[in-house]
Every structure is written in C-alpha cells, then in structure tokens.
Amino acid sequence: MSVVKVIEVVGSSPDGFKEAVDHALHECCRTVRDVVGLEVINWTCSVADGKVREYKADCKIAFRVEDGRV
C-alpha cells in the first residue's frame, strides 16, 4: 500500500510549452523523490509588444510519500 501526494507547480520557458513542462518537472525532481506522474492543468503565456515572451505550464505533480507520511 502506498500514499501519493500531489503538488502544483508552474514551469516557464521562453522556448515553448514542452520546455515549460520539462522545466517544471526538472526543478521539482531536484527536491522531491519518487515522482510518479504529471498532469498539465493549464497553459498560459506572457505577452509583450504583441508577441509571446514566455510560455507557462501549470502542472500537478504526484509523488509517493515515504513511510506513509503526508
């Protein structure tokens, strides 16, 4: 039996949505162990002078909790 916790993070990138998701996951994995899933729940962009300047991905990241601690 295992317990999974879900946190919400926002990744960003000037290069595209895939890179924004990759950045969110990469940064999360630096401090969270045993990541088991990711769900993108929203896509947004920052715009300046009529151009997309930054892509953002709002993500829910799931990871197993060690020893049943939440």
Image: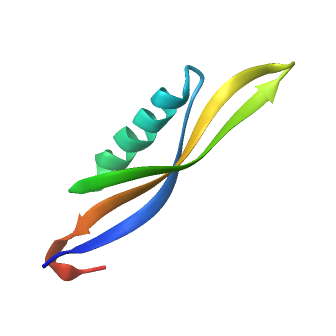
The residue sitting at 44% across, 42% down in the picture is 24
Q: Is residue 47 left or right of residue 39?
A: right
Q: Position of residue 21 (x, y in %)?
A: 46, 37
Q: Quadrant of the C terminus?
A: bottom left
The one of 6 and 26 positioned closer to us in this rendering: 6
Relative vertical location of residue 24 with respect to residue 63 in this rendering, above or below: above
Q: Position of residue 16 (x, y in %)?
A: 55, 24
The one of 55 and 28 positioned closer to us in this rendering: 55
Q: Quadrant of residue 36?
A: bottom left
- Among all residues in the image, which is located at the extreme right? 49
Q: Position of residue 61 (x, y in %)?
A: 39, 56
The residue sitting at 66% across, 28% down in the picture is 54
Q: Quadrant of residue 25?
A: top left
* Residue 33 appears in the rendering: no
* Residue 54 appears in the rendering: yes
Q: Is residue 49 left or right of residue 60?
A: right
The residue sitting at 78% across, 28% down in the picture is 47
Total numbered badges shown on the rendered structure: 0
Relative vertical location of residue 53 with respect to residue 24 in this rendering, above or below: above
Q: Quadrant of the N terminus?
A: bottom left
